[in-house]
Amino acid sequence: MAKSTKPVGVVAEIVPAHVVDSARKLLSRAERQFFNSSFGAALAKHTQAQVQAAMKQARILRNKWRDLHQAQSRSAKKSGRATAVANARTREKPAILAGVEERFASRLAAL
């Protein structure tokens, strides 16, 4: 029987399946890789400088999608079209990326 080892300083985080499923559907390949790097062993391998850079990138991505959603919402209000369904994907991305930022922040605090 193989011995299981847990990375030092990293708390195993159970991510709800619906979060992983929605991330898989919404995020691009690069964003998905970034999302996956915020968990478990991948997160444990990051140095302090790498975690700081990843946090900065997570903020940039979160702000990008948040701002795009706001712009789309303003545009929809001006045009009078019902585009809530089309904007749903854009609305969900910032929440996923905020979770990524939080995981990197907690890892940085542990370092």
Image: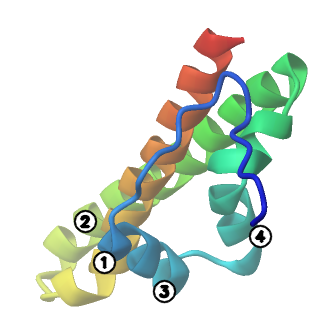
Residue 95 in view (yes/no): yes
Residue depth check, mark 1 versus mark 2: number of the one nearer the observer:
1
Check residue 73 in the rendering and tell me which mark sits there, or answer none: 2
Q: Position of residue 107 (x, y in %)?
A: 63, 24
Identify the secondary structure beneath mark 3: helix
Task: Give the residue type at disc 4.
Answer: Ala
Whether 71 is drawn above or below 46: the answer is: below
Neighbourhood count class around disc 1 (C-alpha, 10 Å): few under 14, some 14–19, many 20 upward = some
Q: Which residue lies at the image location 11% right of the left edge and 82% below the top edge?
A: 80
Neighbourhood count class around disc 4 (C-alpha, 10 Å): few under 14, some 14–19, many 20 upward = few
Task: Give the residue type at disc 2.
Answer: Ser
Residue 38 in view (yes/no): no
Q: Which residue is mark 3?
A: 25
Q: How many marks?
A: 4
Q: Which residue lies at the image location 18% right of the left edge and 81% below the top edge?
A: 84
Give left or right: position of 84 versus 35: left
Residue depth check, mark 1 versus mark 3: number of the one nearer the observer:
3
Q: CA distance from mark 1 to mark 3?
A: 14 Å
Q: CA distance from mark 1 to mark 4?
A: 21 Å
The mark nearer the N terminus, 4 or 2, is 4
Q: Are marks 1 and 2 in contact (CB under 8 Å)?
A: yes
Task: Give the residue type at disc 3.
Answer: Lys
Q: Are marks 3 and 4 in contact (CB under 8 Å)?
A: no
Check residue 87 in the rendering and tell me which mark sits there, or answer none: 1
Residue depth check, mark 4 versus mark 2: number of the one nearer the observer:
4
Nearer to the camera, 47 or 31: 47
The mark nearer the N terminus, 1 or 3, is 3
Q: CA distance from mark 1 to mark 2?
A: 8 Å
Q: Which residue is mark 4?
A: 30
Check residue 66 in the rendering and tell me which mark sits there, or answer none: none
